Image: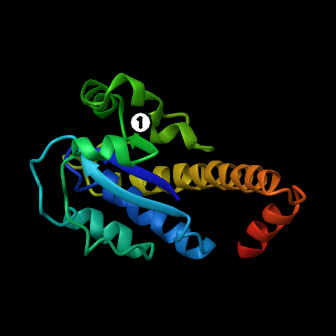
Amino acid sequence: MIKVLFVCMGNICRSPTAEGVFRGILRRKNLEDRIEVDSAGTHGYHAGEAPDQRTQRAAAVRQYDLSNMRARKVAAQDLDYFDLILAMDHNNLSVLKRICPPDKHDRLGLFMSYSKNFDDDEVPDPYYGLGHGFDLVLDMIEDAANGLMESLEQRLREEAEAAAGEDGCSGNDSPAEFDRMN
């Protein structure tokens, strides 16, 4: 099981959108039992609240339901539990680096580093902007989520090959089985 956490400031716009988009990809690829996903904020301003209504509306247009999500603040145990902790911007990545033990810094990164079609390394916060910002955020998140999925699928294939090698199986058995599942 690979565990991924998406992080923004308040966990009401960008990170829940990333979680919702990535859950949709996992469902389509039938990988919900192989990859776990969650989201959180570096600040607890909105803890317990649903995602911003504008975020929910923009996501719903693209068939992502965020209505059952609730904001929460990153907890110390998240830094141990999640294999990959992806911040939406440099500011939140800096906060994560300050609270994360140095031996776990390899788990931290920027979500947009997985983007294929955007040169930006940050997902802009649409909270104080106009409504069209939520659509841009969705475009960026969908792009980075697809890139992340490609990366994680490669990791799953490599893990399957390594496990097959340890079991004395031919290296092609498990990856082929993985490919059939998709």
Relative to 15, does residue 111 appear above or below in the rendering?
above
- Counting from the top left corner in percent of width and height, residue 177 is at 79, 70
| Residue at the image position 38 percent from the left and 50 percent from the top | 5
How crowded pointer 1 is (Cα within 10 Å; few <14, some 14-19, many 20+) is rated as some
Please state if 16 lies on the left or on the right of 24 as rendered: left
Relative to 16, does residue 151 appear above or below in the rendering?
above
| Residue at the image position 31 percent from the left and 71 percent from the top | 66
Write down the quadrant of residue 13 in the picture. Answer: bottom left
Residue 71 at least partly seen: yes
Please state if 103 lies on the left or on the right of 14 as rendered: right
Please state if 143 lies on the left or on the right of 141 as rendered: right
- Counting from the top left corner in percent of width and height, residue 56 is at 28, 69
Q: State the scheme by which the image is colored.
A: rainbow
Residue 135 at least partly seen: no
Write down the quadrant of residue 96 in the picture. Answer: top left
State the count of labels: 1
- Counting from the top left corner in percent of width and height, residue 53 is at 20, 67
Task: Tell me the quadrant of the picture where the C terminus can be found.
Answer: bottom right
Q: Which residue matches tag 1?
A: 122
| Residue at the image position 79 percent from the left and 57 percent from the top | 167
| Residue at the image position 21 percent from the left and 40 percent from the top | 42
**Tag 1: amino acid:** Glu
Q: Nearer the viewer, residue 30 or 92?
A: 30
- Counting from the top left corner in percent of width and height, residue 169 is at 86, 60
Q: Of helix, strand and loop, which one carries label 1?
A: loop
Q: Nearer the viewer, residue 95 or 174?
A: 174
Q: Nearer the viewer, residue 17 or 131?
A: 17
